Amino acid sequence: MRDQWFIRGRVPMTKSEVRAVSISKLELTADGVLYDVGAGTGSVSIEAALTVPGLQVFALEKKAEAAELIRKNKEKFRAETVTVIEGTAPEAFEGLPAPTHAFIGGSGGNMTSVLDTLLKINPSLRVVVNVIALESLAEITGWMKDRSVDGEITAVQTARSRRAGAYHLMEGQNPVYVIAFGGEESPWAEES
Amino acid sequence: MRDQWFIRGRVPMTKSEVRAVSISKLELTADGVLYDVGAGTGSVSIEAALTVPGLQVFALEKKAEAAELIRKNKEKFRAETVTVIEGTAPEAFEGLPAPTHAFIGGSGGNMTSVLDTLLKINPSLRVVVNVIALESLAEITGWMKDRSVDGEITAVQTARSRRAGAYHLMEGQNPVYVIAFGGEESPWAEES
Amino acid sequence: MRDQWFIRGRVPMTKSEVRAVSISKLELTADGVLYDVGAGTGSVSIEAALTVPGLQVFALEKKAEAAELIRKNKEKFRAETVTVIEGTAPEAFEGLPAPTHAFIGGSGGNMTSVLDTLLKINPSLRVVVNVIALESLAEITGWMKDRSVDGEITAVQTARSRRAGAYHLMEGQNPVYVIAFGGEESPWAEES
Amino acid sequence: MRDQWFIRGRVPMTKSEVRAVSISKLELTADGVLYDVGAGTGSVSIEAALTVPGLQVFALEKKAEAAELIRKNKEKFRAETVTVIEGTAPEAFEGLPAPTHAFIGGSGGNMTSVLDTLLKINPSLRVVVNVIALESLAEITGWMKDRSVDGEITAVQTARSRRAGAYHLMEGQNPVYVIAFGGEESPWAEES
């Protein structure tokens, strides 16, 4: 889904290519429950919900302004399976159905506590994290080492064309680290 | 979907991140018809079919070895909506339902003739092309200029972690150019 | 040399990393003559001159505003071996000593005619070209094919850290294509 | 300088583009003293020595096989100002002239102790570090935070063309993080 389709305000948003890669790595299932932690504009929640009908999505966001945006986007895209939760993770998880999948696009500085809580609720949770700061990358690789979590880290850097007369100039986008780990064994997992 | 889930043989394959970005940019619809031209292992066809139930997918491939791989992958993933067409584009399009979407991952050197034929069949076709050679990139940007096609070009370069003892080394992947254009106006297109 | 050391005005400038890679690929020699075609702020001319004492550098620039900037930078860095030539390539080459090395950072749309003229003057010229537009890349790869020039093409994409509180965010820079070819056989060329 | 000019054996080597960027960021001076810590094949030492005549270069390397390679490269390139020191940093620094510049391309796992020792010897040392593992990147950003060192971090990712018939395919190289900090105030530092 194109970035400009979403109602955005001034809230930072996962770019379409990184969103596509992240949702792909989530390996969502129709009977699953996705937590989108630090949901921002809700673009990941909404694209996940529209892509996988049946999936229950909880978009958690502590900032009122962003939560309001998610509600607007939910309405625009008629994403009925998205529930907006205004609150701080991990406290805001209480009372929700246990997740099968989690996307963490922003953690407000307590990423490791969020991850520990999520994995306590469901040890075979499938997790995808996006980080852009090197210190956050260090935090998550440190946490993976401490918990003996074996994950895949992918740096995604794109450049997008911009028209200038008859020319296409390529504009570099900010690199994003996409960390993925965990999850149930896939039915397709046997090496081919 | 992970690359290693697919049966691959020695046929080159679109990598998972680029496949996710390409399928996202195809903006597939449940009532659509996708041509996957130069389908290779069929990974794009199969991931598209599994992601969008209802979509009809035609995987066109001229090499017998590759076509056989696609059939095996179709069976493995029970991708009933994928039809394998062994033949050369654009001739092999004859007799097929008109496409609404086309992915071109390999064109055997006649990309522009394939594109011209596809757009004659359906002028509002949504097209996504993957190229890795600079000369193919020049061919498609030249074609876009000649036909006054206004498209979006995205260079996607990823690096994937490889474990070496306690370390994650990042290994650079080959950059892929993802060109996208055309398509019906999206119901969500009004700028937000 | 850091970008902010140069007097810049509003003239676009090769970024420090790409400048370093380009000057390295020029393989300059102390008894050489470098043409910097479309010299912009003169940053390549000046860094080349300061790095290789003895090298004669001709900074060619057709825009008066940019030529004035180069003169200011020449003065700031006391780059005595840089001569500023205000004029249009290839006409402005007339009367200058034959080049041994050429850097083309901007060609005002007549890159192939500039290259043909340069190689007529010195067939064993060492050339490095920077392009950012895909159409310019197509022009140069097309020219290389027509002239049977075997060159090396390197895409350089960097991301630079920006401090945000205790965090380093990585900001993507625009990718630049650095094309290098020609030159005398290096005394070090025997494969090791 | 081209990678293939160096005698290499099986020792890993900084690639030419990253070497050029790193040497540029070292901001070497003719009256300077460079330590190349974990010198590998010695390519950085030798290119630095040839680029800046007058510079004293100490190539420190703990592995006998690599030290032997550096000696061979020193001889091939007649790099008289390079002194090979076989030993482990930081102990091997003893007895050497104090450095004005240091390049760290490999630290054998004690990077922070090497950095602390170097900055004790010369607090206004100019330092450039190359890391490829995320854990090493975390170590150095953590060290910078602890010591309140304000540095610049640049991720460099290149793709190099490979000929395949009439086509140039771009092959992704591994991303390298180039960290630079410290040094005397440059005479050119006043913002332009």
Image (cartoon, coloured by chain):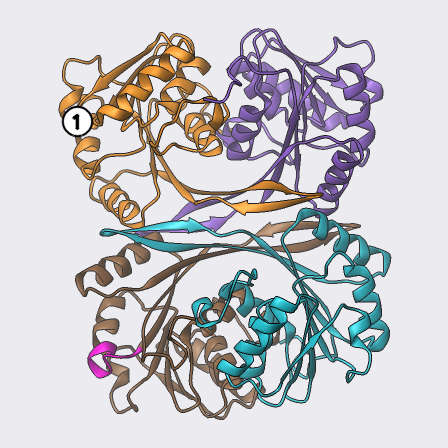
Chain colours: A orange, B purple, C cyan, D brown
Using the image, determine if residue D61 lies above or below residue A53.
Answer: below
Residue kind at label 1, given as amino acid type: Thr
Residue D83 picture quarter: bottom left
Q: Give the range drawn in magenta.
A: D118-125
Any magenta on residue A38?
Answer: no
- Reading the image, the residue beneath label 1 is A88
Instruction: Please name the residue shown 22% across and 17% down the image.
Output: A85
Q: On the rendered image, what quadrant is the C terminus of chain C found in?
A: bottom right
The reply, left or right, for residue C69 in relation to residue A3 is right
Q: Is residue B5 above or below residue D82?
A: above
Q: Mark 1 lies on which chain?
A: A
Badge 1 density bin: few <14, some 14–19, many ≥20, Cα 10 Å:
some
- At x 85% / y 61%, what residue is drawn? C147
- The answer to which of C167 and C44 lies nearer the viewer is C44
Q: Position of residue A55 (x, y in %)?
A: 36, 11
Q: Position of residue B184 (x, y in %)?
A: 64, 15
Secondary structure of the residue carrying numbered label 1? loop
Say which quarter of the image contains residue A23: top left
Q: Depth check: give the residue in front, D1 or A12.
A: A12
On screen, residue B148 above or below B184: below
* Rendered location of residue C48, percent (x, y): 58, 78
